[in-house]
Amino acid sequence: MAKKGEARERITLKCTICGEQNYRTEKNKRNTQDRLELNKFCSKCQKTTAHKETK
């Protein structure tokens, strides 16, 4: 069970093709220090594209 005050941070994922901000998720800052990049479905592009972490 996660404890309050851990190194978790809420991030927004942005489509690399159209720039639409589609997803919000959490990541652990201590374990993953570089920017996150995931393949997700973009509703604007109507296909699966790479989504990168924004600030």
Image (cartoon, rainbow, N blue to C red):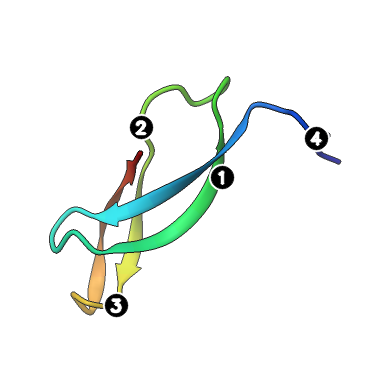
Q: Quadrant of the N terminus?
A: top right
The residue depicted at 23 percent of the width and 79 percent of the height is 46
In the picture of the structure, the residue carrying the numbered disc 4 is 4
Q: Which amino acid does label 3 sit on?
A: Ser
40 or 22, which is in the foreground? 22
Q: Which amino acid does label 4 sit on?
A: Lys
- Up-down relation of residue 47 to residue 2 (above or below): below
Query: Mark 2 highlights which residue?
Result: 35
| Mark 1 burial class by Cα count in 10 Å: few <14, some 14-19, many 20+ | few
Q: How far apart are marks 2 and 4 (CA)?
A: 23 Å
Q: Do the residues labelled 3 and 4 touch (CB within 8 Å)?
A: no
- Circle 1 — which element? strand
Tag 1 or tag 2, which sits nearer the N-term? 1
Residue 50 location in percent, x, y? 26, 53
In the picture of the structure, the residue carrying the numbered disc 3 is 43
SS class, disc 3: loop
- The residue that disc 1 covers is 26
Q: What element carries label 4?
A: loop
- Between the C-alphas of marks 2 and 3, the distance is 22 Å
